[in-house]
């Protein structure tokens, strides 16, 4: 089937494929740097992984330097149509200096910003509250030791300053996403004290006002992690309340909830109380195992909700997975393209007809439409999108990914 034929099929349903393609091209996806090197980072200091963060596998080709990681990212972006961003963690500094986390400054990341200008992409940022001796207790901002809390508060302050400078330099507001691994392996007796310390630390860290045109804060919850099975201090309820009261973005990570919870269902609820939302799109398998996302029901439901509830302009979409059993660059490309494919399918839905059927309680028509729409030629429209952005699809994509992987497999 040709694109013109597919366009005509969708037109019969009242859908304008050109409008969908134009809209998709404007939706930035923030691709996460940590898939490219198994969440190792480039600090010139020793440290454990910590925080329940672990990439499994030993596929050849892991990026060992900032230059190698940037080369891998450039290749990946060339395989992905549309608009791009980079999500950078604080351990990915590019400098010969050896600052501790409470000493980092903008100049330690300046090469990334110069590169982003050349690539015409925006950058988002994250403080790194794991893989450090002062996180070995699985407590950081909620630690009973004031000295440890102060260390991490200063780290967070500096990341906010760095993110604001990034946003200023690139002319695009950077999200500074705050996630801490704090919690207890066994049942605590005073959850309130830990959560009060976390709230006070967050307030101290965020005390300096930043221009939202340059930087916005987000807070990210988690159900549990390795070593914190009994209690996560920064739970969903804690951060949802904090985000609403303090005016931050709320980050909903698809791997940070019970496997039976629908993150798509949460979007319209929290959107009534928040101006903006941050998504970390991942694929949990039994727990927060961060598998490469598929074009599956969960991802499609998320995309549908973003489109149906008119939340695209109020939602920052980022990815969060890491798999070292497969080609790391292929993981980026496959995962990002699947997020885009889901969004395209949502944009190709006859929304007016569907909402009208629901509003008139015609649930039969709603069901007929949603089921019959599954058979429409979405793939042909996706191919057109790829061709317009001069990126490969199908077997050509497979060949491109294979060739690049072969070129980096010799890395030690």
Image: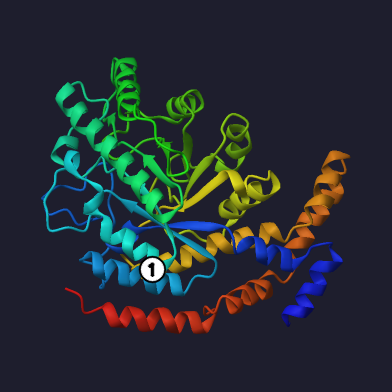
Q: How many marks?
A: 1
Q: Residue at x 50, y 84 (%)?
A: 396
Secondary structure under tag 1 reads helix
Q: In the image, is 344 to the left or to the right of 116? A: right
Q: Nearer the viewer, residue 280 or 120?
A: 120
Q: Nearer the viewer, residue 298 or 389?
A: 389
Q: Position of residue 207 (x, y in %)?
A: 34, 26
Q: In the image, is 370 to the left or to the right of 249? A: right
Q: Residue at x 56, y 32 (%)?
A: 274
Q: Residue at x 37, y 44 (%)?
A: 164
Camera sees residue 62 = no
- Please tell me in which quadrant of the rendered image residue 386 appears: bottom right
Q: Nearer the viewer, residue 162 or 144?
A: 162
Quadrant showing the C terminus: bottom left
Residue tagged 1: 118
- Please tell me in which quadrant of the rendered image residue 197 appears: top left
């Amino acid at each position: 089937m040709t694109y013109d034929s597919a366009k005509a099929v969708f037109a019969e349903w009242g859908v304008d494929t050109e409008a969908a393609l134009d809209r998709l091209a404007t939706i930035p996806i923030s691709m996460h740097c940590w898939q490219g090197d198994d969440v190792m980072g480039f600090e010139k200091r020793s440290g454990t992984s910590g925080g329940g963060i672990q990439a499994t596998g030993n596929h050849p080709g892991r990026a060992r330097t900032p230059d190698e990681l940037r080369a891998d990212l450039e290749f990946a972006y060339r395989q992905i149509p549309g608009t791009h961003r980079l999500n950078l963690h604080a351990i990915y500094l590019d400098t010969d200096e050896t600052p501790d986390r409470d000493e980092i400054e903008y100049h330690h990341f300046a090469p990334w910003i110069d590169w982003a200008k050349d690539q015409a992409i925006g950058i988002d940022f994250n403080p790194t509250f794991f893989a450090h001796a002062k996180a070995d207790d699985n407590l950081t901002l909620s630690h009973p030791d004031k000295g440890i809390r102060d260390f991490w508060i200063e780290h967070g302050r500096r990341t906010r300053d760095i993110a604001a400078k990034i946003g200023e330099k690139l002319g695009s507001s950077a999200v500074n996403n705050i996630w801490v691994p704090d919690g207890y392996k066994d049942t605590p007796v005073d959850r309130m004290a830990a959560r009060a310390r976390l709230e006070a630390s967050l307030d101290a860290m965020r005390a300096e006002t930043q221009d939202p045109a340059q930087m916005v804060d987000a807070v990210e919850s988690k159900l549990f992690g390795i070593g914190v099975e009994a209690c996560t201090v920064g739970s969903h309820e804690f951060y949802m309340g904090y985000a609403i009261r303090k005016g931050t973005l709320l980050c909903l990570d698809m791997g940070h909830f019970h496997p039976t919870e629908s993150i798509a269902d949460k979007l319209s609820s929290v959107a009534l109380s928040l101006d903006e939302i941050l998504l970390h799109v991942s694929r949990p398998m039994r727990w927060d195992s961060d598998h490469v996302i598929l074009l599956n029901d969960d991802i499609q439901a998320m995309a549908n909700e973003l489109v149906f509830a008119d939340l695209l302009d109020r939602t920052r979409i980022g990815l969060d997975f890491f798999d070292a059993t497969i080609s790391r660059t292929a993981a980026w490309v496959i995962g990002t393209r699947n997020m885009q494919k889901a969004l395209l399918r949502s944009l190709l839905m006859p929304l007016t007809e569907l909402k009208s059927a629901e509003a008139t309680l015609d649930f039969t028509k709603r069901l007929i439409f949603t089921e019959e729409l599954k058979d429409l030629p979405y793939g042909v429209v996706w191919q057109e999108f790829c061709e317009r952005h001069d990126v490969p699809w199908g077997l050509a994509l497979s060949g491109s990914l294979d060739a690049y992987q072969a070129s980096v497999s010799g890395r030690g």
